[in-house]
Image: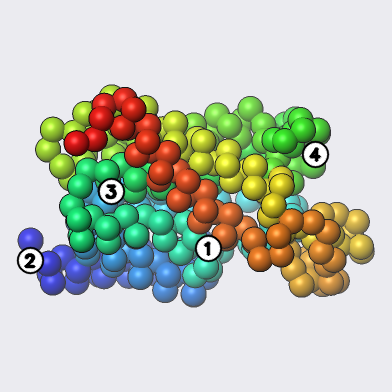
Amino acid sequence: MNQLVQILLGFLLACTIAFAAHRRGSLATSGAVGAVILGTTIFGLGGWPWGVLLVLFFVSSSALSHFKEGRKAQLAEKFSKGSQRDIWQTLANGGAGAVCVLGNVIWPHPAWWVAYAGAIATVNADTWATELGVLNQSAPRLITTGQIVEVGTSGGVSLTGTAAATAGAALISLCAALFPPFPAFPLVPAFFAITTSGLLGSLIDSLMGATVQSIYYCENCRKETERTPTHTCGQPTRYVRGWRWLENDWVNFISSVAGAFLAVFGYWLLSGLQ
């Protein structure tokens, strides 16, 4: 396919998906713009295999975000943003993947595909863990100490959330292993490496949430939150811990980069990249 035609097709496809997601309420206006930028870059420069993984992540995560919305609405005070993704959330989730596509354009190599799949598997695992983990009947535990914490607390993990993360990573991994853009791509090593990296990447996300992510406190509601400068109640929040600059979007991006590196390392161990 002519490169210019592929880029145009990627742009049209990204616009269609972004428009539909915006109408459904999954994307804010700025988030739709971010989705078009990412979709055009990844599909336009990578092609169908690369674009399909991004679409699979976006469609599955968006569908889960609307699953049992009523029960999740009461947890909105915990998270830095609502269910509508803005441009920063979109770029945080897909930015590492876009870098992998650009890297493959400059220096084509199967390692970029593994890294890309690892990054997407991580953000998919993290999203699935969040969207399904908060519905767990029992309270989560802090990943660092095992202390019982409120549902939605940054760094909180549960068996349900971990199982959901594993399933989310495995979905991306299976698609990446079955439909690679390179010939003679070992399926089994790729599947296990990408699934494991996606799960570990999501746990790194939780670890950063429990230790270095910026957390605030609302005196009015007497609750910790990621939100700043104001809480959902309209009152100002007070900084309590973490690195001030490390908000949730940066945590998502860093964990996806970690997932990309872990996927390449794991695949190298299992099969050896030439």
Going by the numbered disc 3, the residue's amino acid type is Trp
Separation of marks 2 and 1 at Cα, in angstroms: 31 Å
Separation of marks 2 and 3 at Cα, in angstroms: 22 Å
Residue at the far left: name it. Answer: 2
Residue position for label 2: 2
| Rendered image: mark on residue 89 | 1
The correct choice, above or below, for 167 with respect to 16 in the image is above
Separation of marks 3 and 4 at Cα, in angstroms: 38 Å
Do residues under tags 2 and 3 come within 8 Å of each other at their CB atoms? no
Image quarter for residue 215? Answer: bottom right
Point out residue 240 in the picture as x, y percentages from the top left corner: 83, 59
Q: Tell me what residue is drawn at x 92 percent, y 62 percent.
A: 219
* Mark closest to the chain's N terminus, 2 or 1: 2
Q: Tell me what residue is drawn at x 7 percent, y 66 percent.
A: 2
Q: Tell me what residue is drawn at x 49 percent, y 31 percent.
A: 166
Residue position for label 3: 112
Q: Quadrant of the C terminus?
A: top left
| Rendered image: mark on residue 205 | none
Separation of marks 1 and 4 at Cα, in angstroms: 25 Å
Q: Quadrant of the N terminus?
A: bottom left
Do residues under tags 3 and 4 come within 8 Å of each other at their CB atoms? no
Going by the numbered disc 1, the residue's amino acid type is Gln
Going by the numbered disc 4, the residue's amino acid type is Val
Q: Nearer the viewer, mark 3 or mark 4?
A: 3
Residue position for label 4: 149
Separation of marks 4 and 2 at Cα, in angstroms: 54 Å
Q: How is the image coloured?
A: rainbow
